[in-house]
Amino acid sequence: MKIVIIGGTGLIGSKTVERLRNRGHEVIAASPNTGVNTITGEGLAEVLAGTDVVLDLANSPSFEDKAVLEFFETSGRNLLAAEKAAGVKHHVALSVVGTERLQESGYFRAKLVQEKLIKTSGIAYTIVHSTQFMEFLAGIAQSGTVGDTVHLSPAYVQPIVSDDVADAMADIALAAPVNGTVEIAGPERARLSDLVGRYLKAMKDPRTVQADPEAKYFGARLEETSLVSDSDPRLGHITFEQWFAKSAQPK
Ligand SMILES: NC(=O)c1ccc[n+]([C@@H]2O[C@H](COP(=O)([O-])OP(=O)(O)OC[C@H]3O[C@@H](n4cnc5c(N)ncnc54)[C@H](OP(=O)(O)O)[C@@H]3O)[C@@H](O)[C@H]2O)c1
């Protein structure tokens, strides 16, 4: 099968490319760095010729409200139109658990626009809702940092390691489209403020975490369960402690 992975050079993209190649498929990692750009349209028609499945694992270079909306809207429109012209049979995209509940945030408004474009495209699809990537904890800590204190909501999270996400993306790419949303999550749940505190301690980071129910998550106020799945998600295998131990190793 010919599979094109948009954002195939990114965190999840590169790991998914490797898994699908190991399973014997013709897999193309498509991104601006490899000459395919979903914003300008460069290389899109050429790379999609004869393609069976497209995985959209791209992310916006900017998370600023206007920029991120423009990115997912323009990228989605261009990509889906090119897929339609090429006769692609399955479009798989990665979005975030709770996207519809987090509409106070510009990032999540943009992800919802991306999802709506897919649902109305007429192309068979599977949208994958993932919880936060464990690799994103550092970015979450950074987003709440003022001086030496990290202000974060005590809402629940159930983050998943990128290797577990890529395993799921590869399986879903090879399965039939569900024309709906499937959810994936990590094996353990914790409060965001507690988990980031444990993470910073494991990384020997001197910052301390202050739990604050009013602290926003990328612009959105969180309820206790805004970021966790309310369906029956596929679970990853890698635990917090396993991942902390690996992340604390010198690179
Ligand atoms: N972070 C989380 O916790 C989380 C949770 C759930 C879902 N997600 C979703 O997961 C997806 C992948 O995230 P990630 O962290 O793996 O992304 P990432 O590592 O930041 O990689 C982004 C990729 O997008 C590509 N890209 C940027 N602009 C492009 C363009 N104009 N045309 C084509 N490709 C373009 C980049 O290509 P270059 O290398 O060439 O620049 C890169 O391959 C995102 O859609 C995100 O919303 C994230």
Image (cartoon, rainbow, N blue to C red):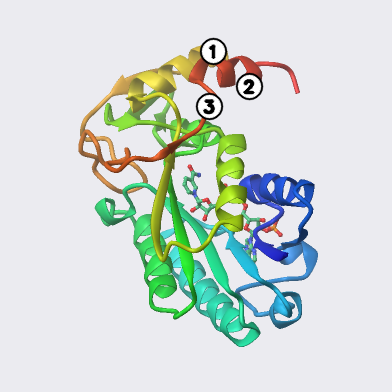
Instruction: Name the foreground residue: 176 vs 155.
Output: 176
Under mark 3, the amino acid is: His
Q: Residue at x 50, y 38 (%)?
A: 133
Q: Which is more N-terminal, label 2 or label 1?
A: 1
Dots 1, 2 in contact, CB < 8 A: yes
Q: Which mark is residue 247?
A: 2
Tell me the SS state at disc 3: loop
Q: Which mark is residue 150?
A: none
Q: Which is more N-terminal, label 2 or label 3?
A: 3
Q: Residue at x 33, y 41 (%)?
A: 217
Tell me residue 153's x, y (percent). Answer: 28, 31
Tell me residue 163's x, y (percent). Answer: 62, 36
Q: In this rendering, would 164 be left or right of 98?
A: right
Task: Please rate how many residues cluster around mark 2, counting C-alpha atoms within 10 Å: few if below 14, some from 14 to 19, many from 20.
Answer: some
Q: Is the residue marked 2 within 8 Å of ligand 1, measured from its CB?
A: no
In the rendered view, would you say 93 is above or below 38?
above
Q: Considering the image in quadrants, where does the N terminus appear?
A: bottom right
Q: Residue at x 58, y 21 (%)?
A: 243
Under mark 1, the amino acid is: Ala
Q: CA distance from mark 1 to mark 2?
A: 9 Å
The residue labelled by disc 3 is 237
Q: Which is more N-terminal, label 3 or label 1?
A: 1
Q: Which mark is residue 202?
A: 1
Q: Residue at x 65, y 80 (%)?
A: 41
Under mark 2, the amino acid is: Ser
Q: Is the residue marked 3 within 8 Å of ligand 1, measured from its CB?
A: no
Q: In this rendering, would 224 be left or right of 166?
A: left
Q: Residue furthest bottom?
A: 85
Instruction: Name the foreground residue: 169 vs 25.
Output: 25
In the rendered view, would you say 244 is above or below 186?
above
Q: CA distance from mark 3 to mark 2?
A: 16 Å
